[in-house]
Image (tube, coloured by chain):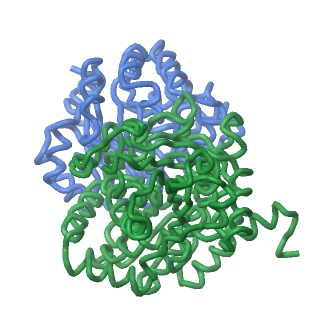
Chain colours: A green, B blue
Amino acid sequence: MAKQVGNEYYESYPNEEGHFGPYGGRFVGETLMEAIYALETAYNRYKNDADFQAEMDKDLADFVGRPSPLYLAENWTQKMGGAQIYLKREDLNHTGAHKVNNTIGQALLAKRMGKTRIIAETGAGQHGVATATVAARLGMECVVYMGAADVKRQAQNVYRMKLLGAEVIPVESGSRTLKDALNEALRDWVTNVDDTFYIIGTVAGPHPYPAMVRDFQTIIGREARSQILQATGKLPDALVACIGGGSNAIGLFHPFIADESVDMYGVEGAGHGIETGQHSAPLCAGAPGVLHGNRTYLMQDENGQIIETHSISAGLDYPGVGPEHAWLKDIGRAKYVAVTDDEALQAFHDLTRMEGIIPALESSHALAYASKLAPTMSSDQILLVNLSGRGDKDMHTVAALAGLNFEE
Amino acid sequence: MSRISQCFENLKADGQTALIPYVTAGDPEPWVTVPVMHALVEAGADILELGIPFSDPMSDGPVIQKACERALKYEVSLIHVFDMVKKFREKDTDTPVVLMGYANPIEAMGYKMFAQLAQQAGVDGVLTVDLPPEESDEFLSLMDEHGIDTIFLVAPTTSKERMAKIAQYAKGFIYYISIKGVTGSAALDVSSVEAKLADLRSCTDLPVGVGFGIRDGQSAAAVANVADAVVVGSTLVRCIEEHADRPEELPAAVAGLLAEMRHAINARDMAK
């Protein structure tokens, strides 16, 4: 079913220009060009450096708590009546999501590059918290840009970042969500480029970010691959992960790309429904363009203006997507689908009740699609879902939908 | 010779420094842009820079971002920008017009269509903030085919080696960004600009314009000491913002501001 892609994929993408086919690249203003080349040089130097890797492995084990377990969701599997559903438990990481895998790597790099100040953008606040966490530990100044709308719906994460010593700057421009936070972080970087390291939270932005963040996140897929082989003696038949920028999805998918028998499904936020236009599904309903340093699928109007997105989940509420996903879509290696807010919420409640696991609303999108896919598969097949984060941060959103308000 | 190169030749012969004002097309209302362009030329502009509104202008500060938002309220698109240039050309066939903006609106139209329509409208140059030489191969050859100068930025962070590379691709003039920062963010330091321009001039014979941080006659004259062109943007756009509710006064207001800079630059040019 999926197009076959061999091991040569790993050598070919991205190429030296940071391109994944026509996607990716280095579309930034001149002031940042030397900075992204310096980052690329530093990353290439340290990615195969034994000391760097050892420090990173130690942090991932002792600070993050890796490896994260692979959990067979038996009750849910039984209810779905199809494939056996395994959950990769990134929700059990320190700080509650996969985001920390990447912030640890980038912060160690920042330290080696002699940078003293860290900036980041955040949507749901998970990347902001993960960044503030590593900055606190390394004793670095940390500034997090967050859309004003997200500051409101993720108040708890905002407080966590402040406790960790980060300055959180609400961004009032544009749609006041993740894309505007990214604009503002880029403006900060241009202004403070000498001492500042920009920790991008997803597999987007100018080269080398999409490749570097992917490499830091592939720990998810590498672990999952050996765990499922150990547990079942075979590879999974399908992988499912949610996609905002796409870092948890590429982290899971990438180590399986050359395994032709493994289907891959990236799940975007369909919001109120693709047909309403109020969604955040650029791969399903967008068109290629250039934003935030790379060429990729974007939600845009016919004049190339970026349009506002909607998702119940702040982490998916972004008009672009990592360029490697754009390429995997075009070559047919991965399939991209979307589920609505309502479907994600249903999955959120189902998993909570059936398995005693409260998933993040982002991850609930992957779960919702898995619940459609599993019944179409046979009971000897394996479906591996990335449970990218936990739902603690979403209590306000879910409670408000049930008519509850914690402040009252 | 392109209209931009001709313009610089003429100024050089007269010992003058070019003055290049920037306004965002369609800000605060679409109808006012062409009268503003004429008023700026009247007040001493040598080349006009017209901003293409974009929803996410990440290299610009809040002043120009708000200008984009005002223009986008009227859904000002590239087609409208070309119409404005066409209309401007009905009365002014001498003053070069440079479009400045971000890659995505141009990508959405398609490079080829953009080049054709820009040429037809009478556009002379294009500066795409987030399209560095690395990503410009196709764009450069199409612009060249249609006689449109591709203007590139050089920043305080640009190495000399990179300057030489950029100079190979640049046409018309090179735009030096005087500060590390977004548009309208801080005042410039002329002595550090001067040092960097010496490097740049060793890589190119093209005229060099300097922008970012020029706020009044004094800073304009100081930049004129080291540059071939003085680019002024946020100061004019701030004036437009202040007049947003009475756009009919705008042509006179921006012309007044620009004239002050023109006089200061002329006084300096005379002294030289």
| A376 or A224, nearer to the observer | A376
The vertical placement of B59 against B150, above or below, is: below
- Residue A7 placement (x, y as % from top left): 24, 49
Residue at 66% in and 38% down: A274
Q: Quadrant of residue A314?
A: bottom right
Q: Name, please, the residue furthest toward the left.
A: B202
Query: How many labels were placed on the picture?
Result: 0
- Residue A213 placement (x, y as % from top left): 37, 62
Residue at 45% in and 35% down: A288
Specify whether residue A192 is in view: no
Q: Quadrant of the N terminus of chain B?
A: top left
The vertical placement of A305 against A397, above or below, is: above
Residue at 44% in and 28% down: B41
Residue at 61% in and 71% down: A390
The vertical placement of A156 against A34, above or below, is: below
- Residue B74 placement (x, y as % from top left): 65, 31
Specify whether residue A37 is in view: yes
| B65 or A98, nearer to the observer | A98
- Residue B143 placement (x, y as % from top left): 29, 24
The vertical placement of A278 against A343, above or below, is: above
| A262 or A27, nearer to the observer | A262
